[in-house]
Amino acid sequence: MLEMTISLQDLGVFLLFVIAIVGGGYLILTLKRLADVLGGVKKILDENDQTISRITANAAVITDEVRQVLKDAEGTVPGIMKNVQGITSSVNDSARKLDASVTTIGSGISETVAAVQDSARDITTYINIATEVAGFIIKMMQKRK
């Protein structure tokens, strides 16, 4: 019989060789897929070359138009700020007047309620007096009989 011994070094070299072959296979597949993707991108760019050129030309025009609009807007911003300040001032004045009106109305209502309470107390007092007088008169009449 033929005997053969494998050392740990030989086993390690063999495993590294197998790993290198498997890794190389994956690397080849990955590079092929990457080449396919890049080919697709190149095809799309070639098909849309004119469109891309028009877009870049339009981008320059759009940029110029945006600059012009911003310049025009710079002139109107101070006027808008003055209008906003005027509106804010008007709202503040209206709020102050409303507060004063509510305070006046509240004071008037409080005074009216106090007057009604005083009148109600006076009426109650008069009714009590009238009841006592009527009771006294009734007792006097009953004693005469």
Image: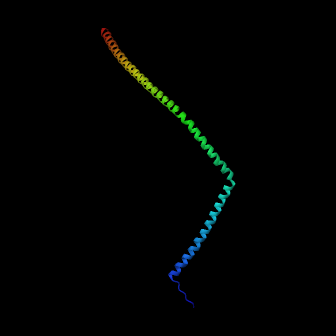
Above or below, 57 against 131 in this view is below
Tell whether 127 sits left or right of 13.
left
- In percent of width and height, residue 124 lies at 35, 17
Tell whether 144 sits left or right of 4.
left
Question: Which residue occupies 50% across, 30% down?
Answer: 82
- Count of marks, rendered view: 0
- In percent of width and height, residue 68 lies at 59, 39
Question: Which residue occupies 51% across, 30% down?
Answer: 83
Q: Nearer the viewer, residue 67 or 14?
A: 67
Quarter of the figure that contains the N terminus: bottom right
The residue lying furthest to the bottom in this view is 1
Above or below, 55 against 2 in this view is above
Quarter of the rendering containing residue 26: bottom right
Quarter of the rendering containing residue 125: top left
Q: Nearer the viewer, residue 4 or 36?
A: 36
Question: Which residue occupies 56% across, 76% down?
Answer: 17
- In percent of width and height, residue 48 lies at 68, 53
Question: Which residue occupies 57% across, 71% down?
Answer: 23
Tell whether 91 sits left or right of 125.
right
Quarter of the figure that contains the C terminus: top left
Q: How is the image coloured?
A: rainbow
The residue lying furthest to the top in this view is 144
Above or below, 72 against 42 in this view is above
- In percent of width and height, residue 63 lies at 60, 44
Quarter of the rendering containing residue 133: top left
